[in-house]
C-alpha cells in the first residue's frame, strides 16, 4: 500500500480548510507549504499590478522562499498538492516547493481552490519543476465539497 501526503499552500485559509478535509477523508499526512514571508491582504490584491502576488505571477522565474524544507517527501509515493489558482496557474511558491525536493517516481495529484477558473496551464507550468514526477491534474475542490466527494477523489489515486 502506498503512503500518501496532502501538501498545500494557502494564502487566505480557504485552501487550508480543503486540504485538512481531504487529508482526513483520505487518511493522509498533512503538510503546509509556508512562505518565508507570509502574504498580507495587500500582497494578494490582484487588482494592484504592483502587489506581491501580481509581481510574482508576472515573473515565471519568481521563486518565493519557503519558511522550511522539512517535508519528508522521500517517504511518500503519492502527494496530493493543493493551492489556490492565481492567474489560471499555480502560485510560483508551488514551483519553489517542487524544486526543493526530489519527486522522482512520485505521483503528484493536483487539487486547487478557485473562485471560478479551472487549472489553466498549472500542470504545464509545474512539470519542469519536478521533471521526473508524474503530475496529474486532479480537481477544483472548494469548501462546499462533501467528505464523500473528497474520499472518491482520493480513492482514484
Image (cartoon, rainbow, N blue to C red):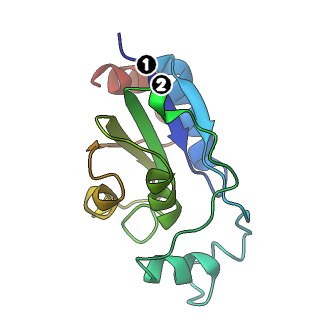
Residue 143 appears in the figure:
no
Q: Which image quadrant for residue 134?
A: top left
Q: How many numbered circles does the render carry?
A: 2
Q: Residue at x 40, y 20 (%)?
A: 151
Image disc number at residue 75: 2
Q: Disc 1 versus disc 2: distance between alpha carbons?
A: 7 Å
Where in the figure is residue 110, as x and y percent of width and height?
Answer: 37, 44
**Relative side of 68 to 130, left or right:** right
Q: Nearer the viewer, residue 105 or 22?
A: 105
- Name the residue that disc number 1 marks: 3
Q: Nearer the viewer, mark 1 or mark 2?
A: 2
The image quadrant where one finds the C terminus is top left
Label 1 close to label 2 by CB (< 8 Å): yes
Most extreme residue toward the top, as rendered?
Answer: 1
In the image, is residue 156 above or below residue 13? above
Q: Secondary structure at mark 1?
A: loop
- At label 2, counting other C-alpha atoms closer than 10 Å, the crowd grade (few under 14, some 14-19, many 20 or more) is few
Where in the figure is residue 97, as x and y percent of width and height?
Answer: 51, 53
Q: Residue at x 45, y 83 (%)?
A: 58
**Relative side of 1 to 43, left or right:** left
**Relative side of 111 to 147, left or right:** left
Residue 3 appears in the figure:
yes
In the image, is residue 58 above or below residue 113? below
Q: Residue at x 74, y 69 (%)?
A: 40
Q: Nearer the viewer, residue 154 or 61?
A: 61
Q: Residue at x 37, y 29 (%)?
A: 78
In the image, is residue 57 above or below residue 110? below
Q: Secondary structure at mark 2?
A: helix
Where in the figure is residue 68, as x and y percent of width and height?
Answer: 68, 49
Amino acid at each position: 500500500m502506498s503512503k500518501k501526503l496532502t501538501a498545500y499552500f494557502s494564502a487566505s485559509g480557504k485552501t487550508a480548510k480543503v486540504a485538512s478535509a481531504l487529508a482526513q477523508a483520505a487518511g493522509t499526512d498533512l503538510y503546509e507549504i509556508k512562505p518565508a514571508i507570509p502574504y498580507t491582504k495587500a500582497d494578494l490584491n490582484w487588482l494592484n499590478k504592483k502587489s506581491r502576488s501580481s509581481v510574482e505571477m508576472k515573473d515565471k522565474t519568481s521563486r518565493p522562499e519557503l519558511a522550511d524544507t522539512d517535508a519528508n517527501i522521500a517517504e511518500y509515493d503519492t502527494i496530493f498538492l493543493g493551492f489556490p489558482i492565481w492567474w489560471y496557474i499555480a502560485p510560483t511558491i508551488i514551483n519553489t516547493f517542487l524544486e526543493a525536493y526530489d519527486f522522482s517516481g512520485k505521483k503528484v495529484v493536483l487539487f486547487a481552490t478557485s473562485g471560478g477558473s479551472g487549472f489553466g496551464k498549472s500542470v504545464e507550468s509545474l512539470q519542469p519543476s519536478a521533471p521526473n514526477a508524474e503530475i496529474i491534474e486532479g480537481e477544483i475542490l472548494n469548501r462546499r465539497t462533501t467528505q464523500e466527494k473528497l474520499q472518491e477523489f482520493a480513492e482514484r489515486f
